[in-house]
Image (spheres, grey):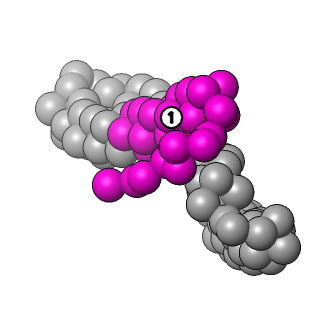
Amino acid sequence: EVSVPEDTPWYVETIYYAVTVAAMLFQIAATVRSSLVALMGPALALRGKAGAMHRSVEAMEPCFRGAWQCFLAGMFFWLMSTLINIFQQAQHWGIGVFAGVGIIVGTIGIYRDIGYVSRRF
């Protein structure tokens, strides 16, 4: 459960919930899309007619790219949601800035690692 302080303006609370829901939707979309591609692509390659292997491989790449984009969008919205929540909960701006910088630095590290792994494939 996430508690939003009572003195939070309605528009900040609305933005927080909208960003949080967007993060969840993008992450669910990435999971569902990658699962479907991982299940249906090989099935087409194994059970299809002649040439189905090439068709399957060619179809899987753009689908995985879409899942990848959903995943990255979900990460971005999760970061925004976390930052909004930190600034809502922080008693002092200094605490919020300190925690926000930590989250941003950590997220940059995650994105750099994702880039490193992506270049390997």
Relative to 27, does residue 105 appear above or below in the rendering?
A: below
Q: Quadrant of the N terminus?
A: bottom left
Q: Pointer 1: residues within 10 angstroms few (<14), some, or many (20+)?
A: some
Q: Nearer the viewer, residue 69 or 120?
A: 69
Left or right, 44 with reference to 77: left
Relative to 22, does residue 100 appear above or below in the rendering?
A: below
Query: Which residue sits at x=40%, y=53%?
Result: 2
The percent position of residue 59, horizontal first and vertical second, equals 46, 28
Q: Magenta includes 13?
A: yes
Q: Magenta includes 54?
A: no
Look at the image and tell me whether residue 27 can be seen: yes
What number of labels is visible? 1
Q: Nearer the viewer, residue 58 or 22?
A: 22
Relative to 82, does residue 30 appear above or below in the rendering?
A: above
Magenta region, main secondary structure:
helix
Look at the image and tell me whether residue 71 can be seen: no
Which residues, given as a range, are shown in magenta? 1-29
Query: Which residue sits at x=20%, y=37%?
Result: 43
Q: Quadrant of the C terminus?
A: bottom right
Q: Residue furthest left?
A: 47
Q: Quadrant of residue 98?
A: bottom right
The percent position of residue 96, horizontal first and vertical second, equals 75, 67
Q: Secondary structure at mark 1?
A: helix
Query: Which residue sits at x=21%, y=26%?
Result: 48
Query: Which residue sits at x=70%, y=57%?
Result: 87
User: Which residue was labeled with disc 1?
Assistant: 17
Q: Which residue type does callout 1 highlight?
A: Tyr
